[in-house]
Image: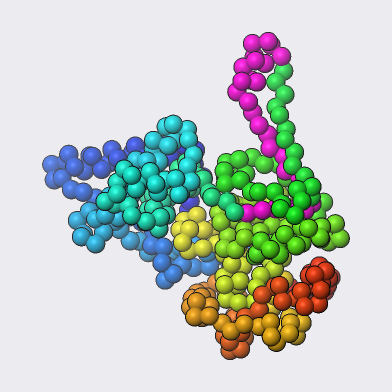
Amino acid sequence: MLISSTSLEVRARIEVSVLNFLKNLNSPDPAISDLPLINRRLSNSRVNQGILTDISSIFLSHSFCTRSLMKANAAKAFVRVWKVMEMCFHILVEEKQVTQRELFYKLLCDSPEYFTSQLQVNRTIQDVVALLRCSRYSLGIMASSRGLVAGRLLLQALILSLLSLLIAFLHSVLYEPNHEVVDCSACGSSGYAISGDLNLLEKLVMKTDARYIILVEKHAIFHRLAEDRVFDKIPSILITAKGYPDIATRFILHKMTRAFPDLPILALVDWNPAGLAILCTFKFGSIGMGLEAYRYACNVKWLGLRGDDLQLIPEQSLAPLKPRDLQVARSLMSSKILQENYKEELTLMVQSGQRAEIEALYFHGYDYLEKYIEKKIVQANYI
């Protein structure tokens, strides 16, 4: 189980790891210990079915792998773990935050023989998370966010100014914190940009009178719905990650589910394997997130597009599945996360060899998308 940790606790765990490493080297029978890490492969994943809630999530089972300095094919990965831990320790000491991209360039300059790609850094961060049993943002690593939110949501950030606190103390007056309130319905068609600072997101106070959260796969569709102010007619919050979900967008969506547990989350995605994969990442988490996977799982329902919507779309708007689509479909089918009605939809996609994009509904006019969503919600036509 992943433990929420403060920066001081994580620094202490790094120090203990280093001390244990040095202790083994200085023992009468010196040895370099392997690093035991949870195996983040599909074969080691399971689905935790909610008992008291409707939320199911991916978790990693008992299988371990190791990073060893004594194995030629794992030696560099072993060193990368220590390099990233060292860098994170300095970040925490300096009370800074960095993105994964910033961390990559720093490591590329400092240790080019060990880090040549962003993927190596991303995987090593997950190794460190697995080793220290902490979250990435407790390591000082913040998310790069693409996400946007709009609609009937008020966000309130409590900003504590150290200067204001000092002035209040010196003048013996009561300090009143600055409350910045953002009305997401007044942010226009561009929406409100979700911060990549997960610590800041965690401190947000949320208020809403919405009845639904509409999760939109694509930025263009989000822009259309926000521009048309769909949330005025369908009391809702709109949210998008502009494609494959980033951590910050998943984090704030999960925070919404905790703040507003009665609001259904309805996903609007393209009818293709990639759209379903995006939905499933929001719904179950992702194996690539390792021990952090369960933290962001939400009870997302599939509003559309689905197979029964194809009758609304002219045949010339359908496109053939690409090889990448078939690869994603095989991966989804081989996983244990898909519920039966999702498997049926995926099977229909593969058998038909076709895909449909949400924009195809514009055949009926640019205002049809709102009517489509409204009808689906009224009929509770989501799975």
Whether residue 94 is in magenta: the answer is no
The C terminus lies in quadrant: bottom right
Q: Which residues are magenta?
A: 147-173
Camera sees residue 208: no
* Residue at x 50% of width, y 76% of height: 324
From where the camera sits, is residue 63 visible? yes
The structure residue drawn at horizontal position 35% and vertical position 61%, both measured from the top left corner, is 64
- Left or right: 318, with 45 as reference point: right
Q: Which of the two residues, 46 or 11, is positioned nearer the viewer here?
A: 11
Residue 163 percent location from the top left of the image? 61, 20
Q: Is residue 249 left or right of residue 37?
A: right
Q: Nearer the viewer, residue 227 or 378?
A: 227
Q: Position of residue 287 (x, y in %)?
A: 48, 63
User: Which one is in front, 98 or 318?
Assistant: 318
- Asked if residue 81 is positioned above or below residue 11 in the image, the reply reads below
Q: Given the current orientation, which residue lies at the most extreme bottom position?
A: 351
Asked if 214 appears above or below 273 in the picture, the reply is: above
Asked if residue 148 lies in the magenta stretch, the reply is yes
Question: In terms of image quadrants, where is residue 379?
Answer: bottom right
* Residue beneath the point at 17% across and 41% down: 27
Residue in the picture at 68% in, 10% down? 171
**Farthest residue, direction right:** 233
Residue 326's spot in the image, x, y percent? Answer: 51, 81
In the rendered image, residue 12, in percent from the top left (x then y), is placed at 39, 36
Instruction: Give the left or right position of residue 225, taking residue 346 as reference.
Output: right
Q: Quadrant of residue 247?
A: bottom right
Outermost top residue: 171
